[in-house]
């Protein structure tokens, strides 16, 4: 007895088993597998009704996975790209801002072993932190604070 192609709902469940996905992400990933028009909207509706798709869990998952390596700016972009509710994104980013300096300091410490000695090093270290989504004020504080504080 052979098995047919998995349904959209089956594919969605397989994706959700790997990590949390927003509705928009699932629809984007499943779009190429829709055989009957309208079924692409139906599967996520059913999964959301059964709490398999939960925006707050998606937000919490991204923050948990990425906060140790990225600043609030980059995490905000990732959350927005997932099509999540703007209010949930704003709440998550506000929570991250409270620990932004400590997280930036730890990311900087893992990469560099000393404060910059000249303008070139300062620029390099600043670009490194900026690329990870940390803001200018936090970067200045990290690069001006001796490592023993």
Image (cartoon, rainbow, N blue to C red):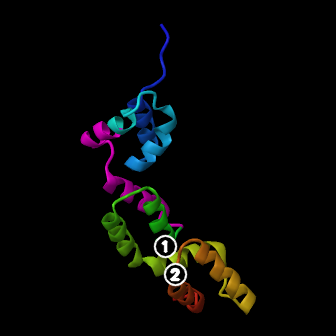
Q: From the viewer's perspective, tell me whether residue 81 is left or right of residue 145.
A: left
Regarding mark 1 in the picture, which secondary structure is present there? Answer: helix
Q: In the rendered image, is residue 81 in sight? A: yes
Q: Which residue is located at x 42 percent, y 39 percent?
A: 17
Residue sticking out furthest to the front: 37
Q: Residues within 10 Å of mark 1 (few under 14, many from 20)?
A: some
- Residue 29: percent from left, percent from top: 49, 42
Give residue 73's mark: 1
Assess whether residue 90 is covered by the magenta stretch: no
29 and 99: which one is in front?
29
Q: Which residue is located at x 42 percent, y 31 percent?
A: 8
The quadrant holding residue 84 is bottom left
Vertical relation: 9 (above or below) 51: above
Q: Which residue is located at x 57 percent, y 71 percent?
A: 132
Residue sticking out furthest to the top: 1
**Magenta residues?**
44-69
Q: In the rendered image, is residue 109 in sight? A: no
141 and 112: which one is in front?
141
Disc 2 and disc 1: Cα gap in Å? 7 Å
Label pair 2/1, CB-CB below 8 angstroms:
yes
- Residue 118: percent from left, percent from top: 73, 92
* Residue named by callout 2: 135
Regarding mark 2 in the picture, which secondary structure is present there? Answer: loop
Vertical relation: 48 (above or below) 108: above
């Amino acid at each position: 007895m052979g098995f047919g192609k998995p349904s959209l709902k089956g594919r969605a469940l397989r994706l959700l088993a790997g990590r949390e996905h927003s509705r928009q992400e699932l629809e984007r990933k499943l779009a190429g597998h829709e055989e009957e028009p309208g079924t692409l909207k139906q599967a996520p509706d059913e999964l959301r009704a059964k709490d398999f798709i939960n925006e707050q869990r998606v937000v919490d998952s991204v923050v948990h996975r990425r906060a140790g390596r990225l600043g609030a700016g980059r995490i905000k972009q990732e959350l927005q790209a997932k099509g999540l509710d703007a209010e949930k994104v704003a709440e998550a980013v506000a929570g991250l801002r409270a620990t932004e300096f400590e997280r930036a300091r730890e990311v900087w410490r893992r990469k560099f072993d000393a404060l910059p000695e000249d303008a070139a090093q300062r620029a390099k270290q600043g670009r490194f932190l900026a690329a990870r989504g940390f803001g200018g004020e936090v970067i200045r504080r990290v690069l001006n604070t001796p490592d023993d504080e």
